Image: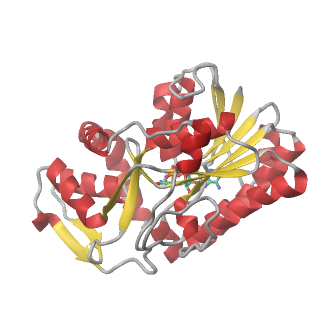
Amino acid sequence: MRILVTGGAGFIGSQFVRAALLGELPSGPGTRVTVLDNLTYSGNRANLAPVADHEGYTFVQADIRDAAAVDEVMPGHDAVVHFAAESHVDRSISDASPFVTTNVLGTQVLLDAALRHKVGRFAHVSTDEVYGSITEGSWTEEWPLAPNSPYSASKAASDLMVLAYHRTHGMDVTVTRCSNNYGRYHFPEKMIPLFVTNLLDGRKVPLYGDGGNVRDWLHVSDHCRGIDLVLHRGRAGEVYNIGGGTEMTNRELTERLLAACGAGWDRVEHVTDRKGHDLRYSLSIDKIREELGYEPLTGFDEGLADTVAWYRDNRQWWEPLKEKAELHA
Ligand SMILES: NC(=O)c1ccc[n+]([C@@H]2O[C@H](COP(=O)([O-])OP(=O)(O)OC[C@H]3O[C@@H](n4cnc5c(N)ncnc54)[C@H](O)[C@@H]3O)[C@@H](O)[C@H]2O)c1
């Protein structure tokens, strides 16, 4: 199978590409991958260094909003796995426009090209944030969409566009909605890598509000296993939630990160809460578990220890990115 992976130089996309080429996904070896990525501040070819010489790997630097470039790359692929997006909520609060152009318009450009070139399957990667915030219980896939940030609103729009191409054109699409990911190669502006790299540098960590917001943390390798299952065995036109990690408040997470880095609560700086900050996310994963036999494999303690050790050993990867993140903040 030859897959076009958009956003394959980012955090999750690069995990998917490395695992696909190294035969570590449930579908096994034999996948060939073209990465389509325009290398924004969060895209980084170093994330793909472990597979750079793999014979099944091709890299194309192009923007998903560029219809001519997308049309040139699309032919010959059996499937698209669509990760490319502007992904940081805080940035969407200061400037929503690249979120709308990349996440909504870019998705439509890809859908049109995939339709034109009769690509077998379009697997769209989305987020649990499209459901909004939930005080009790967990979201199923039928839950109404009620996004609160410009980021999640743009992702909800892209989900609806993908599902509309299924209903209107009969395109073979799937949508996956995942909870918060963590792991290696995570750009150091997101909470876990930001806190770990600050702590390793002897700096303070900024905790929003009272730290009471609840998130479900899933190891990035489990997210990619779920995407692979849906790509190969999910039903066309269906949405699948991917989660089943560990739910905890940001305060509890901060305590774990401080302990993992040997630091105390004096290193925490309470900062003004994010505007419109969703209180709690929680996903039901009954559908993917029952239909596709999905279960997360990496426990949070094990995954966090591996992540912290990786950041400790890979300063040459994150130090230049930290400067880039601060320049673009
Ligand atoms: N990070 C999470 O916890 C999480 C959870 C659920 C879903 N998601 C979704 O997973 C996907 C990947 O997220 P991530 O955390 O890896 O993001 P990321 O910011 O690390 O990577 C995004 C990638 O997309 C590329 N890109 C951005 N705009 C582009 C454009 N116009 N054309 C071509 N390439 C472009 C970037 O260069 C980068 O390589 C996103 O769609 C996101 O909404 C993320």
Label count reads: 0
Percent across and percent down for residue 255 are: 19, 59
157 is higher (above) or lower (below) than 125: below
Percent across and percent down for residue 325 are: 40, 59
Coloration of the structure image: secondary structure
Q: Using the rendered image of the protein, determine whether residue 39 is visible from the camera's viewpoint.
A: no
120 is higher (above) or lower (below) than 210: above
The residue positioned 54% from the left and 76% from the top of the image is 148
56 is higher (above) or lower (below) than 314: above
Percent across and percent down for residue 172 are: 80, 44
The residue positioned 70% from the left and 48% from the top of the image is 174
Percent across and percent down for residue 43 are: 52, 48
The residue positioned 67% from the left and 35% from the top of the image is 233
Horizontal relation, residue 162 to residue 204: left or right: right
Front residue of 88/39: it is 88
Q: Report the quarter where the C terminus lies.
A: bottom left
Q: Using the rendered image of the protein, determine whether residue 318 is visible from the camera's viewpoint.
A: yes
Q: Quadrant of residue 214?
A: bottom left
Q: Report the quarter where the N terminus lies.
A: top right
Horizontal relation, residue 311 to residue 278: left or right: left
Horizontal relation, residue 52 to residue 182: left or right: right
The residue positioned 44% from the left and 40% from the top of the image is 296
